[in-house]
Amino acid sequence: MSASVRIASFNINGIKARLPRLLEWLEETRPTVACLQEIKSMDENFPAEEFEKIGYKAIWHGQKSFNGVAILADGVEPVEMQRGLGIDGPKDGEGEQARYLEAEVNGVRICNLYLPNGNPQPGPKFDYKLAWMKRLRARCQEHLAAEIPTVVLGDYNVIPEDKDVWAVKAMQDDALMQPESRDAYRRMLNDGWTDAIDTLNPRGGVWTYWDYQAGAWPRDHGFRIDHLLLSPDLADRLLAAGVDKEYRGREKASDHAPVWVELRG
């Protein structure tokens, strides 16, 4: 077994537009597992062969123009365990959105999620966000009960605490930091999940997202919404966690930076 395992998450904001950057990041940082969100691609258009060329095998769950998640693993095929949480989107008759994909990779359960944004709030989109979080928590409780080594990672669209945003006032009306969103996130932590980045950066000030608007990136006006939650046994194996911040500054970058956790093998 290798000395350590790196599991990463990257909201790429469109796989077609971002493919060169994504391949660059995979080759330069070589995560063992990479979870992608907002691939914004139909299943049949997913560029699996591009990842195969550099040694990654993929599974994916897409839909037209919006959402979409994928799990890539270095040299092994992720074994799909579940797609979707069985909860319909907020519009009448739209069915389930492509926001959740779960797989087994080398004995670790990987739960990749793109949690609903929830704006505008209050309203049906915010209600959908909270219902989705409730469903996620229930699924994650099953993994804890079964003592399955699990990482629950992705774009949570939740700013957990005031220390996780550049200016509280700027975001105070946003669905990302409403008390209900934060409470739902805290309930998961209280169940026994460890927020890897927060554990190693207790004072906060770590951002994973910078808006394209209003010069957010050059001014470092960011916030933390991409999280890696570890089950108790994996928390015991935590070596490091961080943000690949420099990738946000590259040409045609996503508005998110990749986040990662390194675990003892």
Image (cartoon, rainbow, N blue to C red):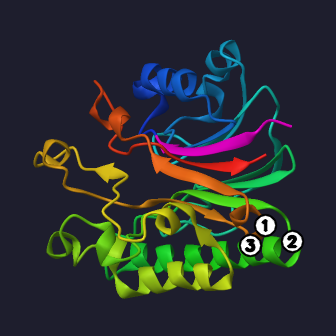
> Could you say which disc has been placed on residue 139 in the image?
3
Q: At label 2, which amino acid type do we have?
A: Glu
- Comparing 3 with 186, the one in front is 3
In the displayed structure, does residue 229 sit left or right of residue 146?
left
Q: Residue at x 22, y 78 (%)?
A: 173
In the displayed structure, does residue 212 sit left or right of residue 178?
left
Mark nearest the camera among 2 and 3 is 2
Mark nearest the camera among 1 and 2 is 1
Q: Magenta residues: mostly which secondary structure?
A: strand
Examine the rendering and report whether any part of residue 15 can be seen: yes
Q: Residue at x 87, y 50 (%)?
A: 107
Asked if the residue under mark 1 is in contact with the one under mark 3, i.e. CB atoms within 8 Å, the reply is no
Assign a secondary structure to mark 3. helix
Q: Picture coordinates of residue 206 (x, y %)? A: 35, 58
Whichever of labels 2 and 3 marks the residue nearer the N terminus, that label is 3
Q: At label 3, which amino acid type do we have?
A: Arg
- Comparing 255 with 219, the one in front is 219
- For mark 1, what is the residue? 233
Which quadrant: the N terminus? top right
